[in-house]
Amino acid sequence: MTKLKLDPDATHRILIRSPNWVGDAVMCMPAVLRLREAFPKSYITVLARAKLAELWTHQPAVDEVIQFNSSDSPFAVARKLQSKRFDLAIVMPNSHRAAVEVWLARIPIRVGYARPWRNLFLTVAVPPRQEAYAVKKKSVHQIKRLAARAAAHAEPEPSTIAHQIHDYLHLVGVCGAQTELARPALHITDAEKEAFAKKFILRPGIGLTTTLNMAALAPGAEYGPAKRWPAERFIAAANEVSNRTGCQWLVFGLANDSHLAQQIAGAIPTAYNLCGRTTLSELMAGLALCRVLLANDSGAAHVAAAVGTPVVVPFGSTSPALTGPGLPGDSQHRFLKSGVACAPCFRRTCPIDHRCMESISVEQVVKAVLDVGFTR
């Protein structure tokens, strides 16, 4: 790996352009930690969309967060950066726009993965890792052909060395940081947990204790319905777990998940529907108070793993080896797969019968939830 020759004892002003999705932003946090270790005297700033800024608030590796809105033009974003006089920008997203922003801000060293056209805006265009997995959506024809196969003929799972966390670590490695794995970690204060509990859970006069018997559900998935385990199975699994453990369920999600969350929470007597009612910081605090999160492959699953809460995720159209929450291979979590030959297809919607998710049973999920959330 060719590395930039940067003095680790100098006080560099370093900009990290954050990914735009919650899960991706969480997965790049080990890279930011390694960068801080390599440049302990530098001033590290994260540039993030406003909706993600709270992820970075208590990160010890970060000195400052600059927010921008999705409606801001690249020129408007660049104006926010120019007065900071950054020496180095590390562009985590692979988008053209992210590279244009730091180019317009006239940051002298701009590091990011090589992509056609956007290389013009980078001073260091990094080739993809040899171990990286080239994610391509399967065509409808491919899916139908593969679906005719037996599960025993399914494609082999990618190696965990292909996980996206390694891609972000590789970028900071080019800048001189170490690339050893570190667990993605979000930092929540006791005061934030207490505030969440008082707002959503506890009756007046009752203090927060460590004996809260709560679990969490996050049945949405922004990318599309192909990533969603069926709603009726979330209901059945949650009710069975409640019957066995007496736990209460907190249902989390974005505002556009409200109909789905209402349907699910309404069928679970022990559920509280918080969908669309929490800020990102409150989501983090709420998940930190839960024994386990049952979720689709989503940002909420990455947040839960990063605050130390075990997660159970049914995987279908995507691969846990590539984007699974937490540290790759961490036994604290359970990722369930059906083994059908057409998965992962990386499509937003299933063109056939959604067999990858339909094949994951309620019994499998209940066992996994009990195992990681109630028997450890």
Image: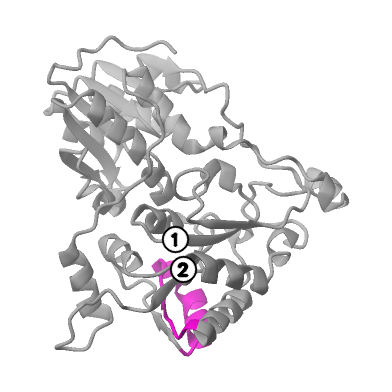
Residue 20 rendering spot, x and y as whole percentages: 38, 44
> Looking at the image, can residue 18 be seen?
yes
* Magenta residue check for 255: yes
Provide the secondary structure element on which disc 1 rests.
Answer: loop
Side (left or right) of 345 relative to 288: right
What is the span of residues highlighted in magenta in the rendered image?
245-269
Circle 1 packing at 10 Å, graded few (<14), some (14-19), many (20+), is many
> Looking at the image, can residue 76 be seen?
no
Look at 55% across and 84% down and name the residue there. Answer: 239
Residue type of the residue flagged with mark 1: Pro
Up/down of 75 relative to 211, above or below: above
* Residue that badge 2 annotates: 373
Residue 350 rendering spot, x and y as whole percentages: 70, 57
Residue type of the residue flagged with mark 2: Gly
Side (left or right) of 220 relative to 306: right
* Closer to us: 255 or 180: 180
* Residue that badge 1 annotates: 310
- In which quadrant will I find the C terminus? bottom left
Up/down of 36 relative to 288, above or below: above
Residue 78 rendering spot, x and y as whole percentages: 23, 31
Look at 74% across and 56% down and name the residue there. Answer: 351
- In which quadrant will I find the N terminus? top left
Do labels 1 and 2 touch, CB within 8 Å? Answer: yes
Provide the secondary structure element on which disc 2 rests.
Answer: helix
